[in-house]
Image (cartoon, rainbow, N blue to C red):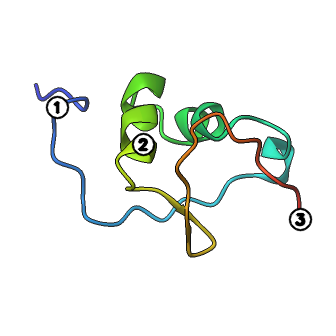
Amino acid sequence: MSDPETEILPEILDVTLPTEAAGERLDRALAAALPDLSRTRIQALVRAGKVTIEGRLADDPGKKIAGG
């Protein structure tokens, strides 16, 4: 069985977060939406410049998600 933490991810994952995620940390919201990835892995992806929010680079895994 493969380990999702070490697997190569597809080049693009399109994730739509629920409105309830507003005000949450980006890494926590993504961890809830992507349960196969640990929060540590998600933090590393954000810091590596692999995450965008509405087309803009997200570089802070602790940034609060805006609502709306």
- Place of residue 51 in the rendered image (x, y in percent of width and height, measured from the top left): 46, 56
Q: What residue sits 38% from the left and 56% below the top?
A: 50
Q: Residue at x 89, y 65 (%)?
A: 68
The quadrant in which residue 56 appears is bottom right
The residue that disc 2 covers is 47
Where is residue 2 shown, x and y percent of the image? 12, 29
Q: What amino acid type is highlighted by mark number 3?
A: Gly
* Quadrant occupied by the N terminus: top left
Q: Are marks 3 and 1 in contact (CB under 8 Å)?
A: no
Identity of the residue drawn at 88% across and 56% down: 67
Q: Quadrant of residue 46?
A: top left
The residue furthest right is: 68
Above/below status of 61 relative to 39: below
Secondary structure beneath label 3: loop
Residue at x-position 56% and y-position 75%: 55
Q: Give the amino acid at mark 1.
A: Thr
On the image, numbered disc 1 is attached to which residue?
A: 6
Mark 3 or 2, closer to the camera: 2
* Earlier residue among tags 3 and 1: 1
Disc 2 packing (10 Å; few <14; some 14–19; many ≥20): some
Q: Amino acid at mark 2?
A: Arg
Q: Which residue is mark 3?
A: 68
Q: Report if the CB atoms under discs 3 and 2 are less than 8 Å apart.
A: no
